[in-house]
Image (tube, rainbow, N blue to C red):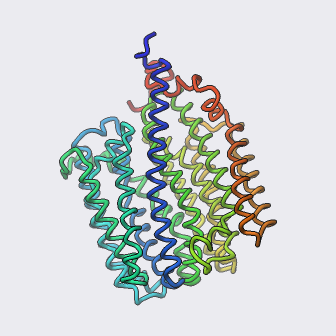
Amino acid sequence: MSDKSPNSPSTARRAITRIGGQGALLMAGFAGAQGCSFLRNALLGHWLSQGDFGIAAAITLMLQLVDTLSDIGADRLIIQAPDGEAPGLQATAHATLIARGAITSLLLLLAAAPTTAYFGIPEATWAFQAIALVPLVKGFIHLDARRYQRALRNRPQVLIELLPQLSALLLTIPVLFHSPNYSAVVWLALTQAAIALVVSHALSERTYTVVLNKQYLDRLIRFGWPIWLSAFPLVAVYQGDRMIVGGLLSIEDLAAYTTAFMITMVPGLLAARVGNALMLPLLSEVRAHRLQFRQRYKMMFELISILATTYLAFFIAAGGSLLPIVFGPNYEDLGAIVACLAAMWALRMLQSVPGMALMAKGDTQPLLWAGLARATGLPLAITAVHLDYGLLGAAAAGVAAEVLSLIYVVIRTSRHATVGWPLAATTLTMLASASASGALISINLLGFEPVRLVVAVLTTLFVLAASLLAMPSPRELIFEKHSLRALFATTAKNKGRDANAPA
């Protein structure tokens, strides 16, 4: 068989090299973007008083809230759909983005006064009104970068993520000199939105067009309504705990909780975003080939399990030491909260694989029910706060809800691909071992921060090595690359095809 055969060694090697290269690009780009965001927030944490940082956190929280509540997945349909290259589909998606931006801007404007009254910061009403411009500007972003991702061309999307964050970081200190209070967040958010808009159009190939095609709009609604409805419980998941802390406790408590959330969120969100950008096109490519779909799903779940385990070990061990270093001395003695939030993000990482598998199959309704399972954390957090368990109780409630959601989404994905009991047991063992080792370091080396950080890093490297050896697919990647040829061959059109899968 010639090297041009789709199942040949050279074809498989090229596929593996390409996927690895795109993974490295995504990791570098998203890491750069999240790193810029993190450094910007660290500067704000050091520069602003705890009260001003709390108001800044509330402003950011509202932006995240409306972004989540208005998501209908139009950009992901372009990646997932067999005809995602169709200009009419993209133009209709542009129209839905504009409508989304206009509606969310209006809602933000109307909600400004009630929101500041809830948080007890009426003096900041003008700032909450000003940020209503952010979603309006972002509504006109060009979606060509999403179309490129169908072919694993991720550079444009990486630049759309990175350049606005880098610009905001470079402007942070000048803006703080000019406005050394919470208003700095408003000007930086508006700057980011404007730069993202300009970059998306500069990197596009197609002319920006807006069309309302009824056929495409119906498809967008069918694909997006479960995603949209699932956004409501997701608000409880991603913003609900902070809303409770800010409203039922104090704006200073919101500042403390937000710093712990941010330090755990950055690597967790980075892993999820890089993984999602790779997983959705790779799973969508073989959605009609049952055997390859299941093989890729299994390998992805193993790799994300290793990542979640390594992440969890480090943040339980060292998170409490890092927080005051990064955000300043106002944020000490929060190690237990950091550990709980790290566990929550580790569980979210694990859910990304079954979530992308469902989306690749076009089966988005289970995502709504998974979101509802996650939303049980909201009443649990309210109860914990009322019972005087404070910030730790709110964080623990999120962990409990993520466990429920993970169990549900893995079960619902089983008709497409399964996580076998041996893999589940290995994953649970790895997570438990990582948690135990991190807790031992955190407790026994409390007060010896330099030593604690060094030991935490060494332990994390050991956990990573042990996890790589514990999972079959990573062992094959390291020692037996030839055994992965079939997995990354782009055909097998007549092998393991699911007759019921959409072509």
Q: Residue furthest right?
A: 444
For this view, does 260 lie left or right of residue 170? right
Between 368 and 254, the one lying in front of the other is: 254
Q: In percent of the image, x 66 and y 69: which residue is there?
A: 337
Residue 87, x across and y down, in percent: 22, 42
Residue 499, x across and y down, in percent: 45, 25
Where 385 falls versus 146 (above or below)? below
Please count the marks in the image. Answer: 0
For the question of whether residue 256 can be seen, the reply is yes
Residue 151, x across and y down, in percent: 36, 36
Where 266 falls versus 172 (above or below)? above
Between 81 and 166, the one lying in front of the other is: 166
Q: In percent of the image, x 28 and y 54: which residue is there?
A: 200
Rendering quarter of residue 153: top left
Q: In percent of the image, x 32 and y 66: which residue is there?
A: 135
Where 485 falls versus 294 (above or below)? above
Between 22 and 166, the one lying in front of the other is: 166
For the question of whether residue 211 can be seen, the reply is no
Q: Residue furthest bottom?
A: 123
For this view, does 255 lie left or right of residue 317? left
Residue 220, x across and y down, in percent: 32, 48
Q: Quadrant of the C terminus?
A: top left
Q: Residue furthest top?
A: 1
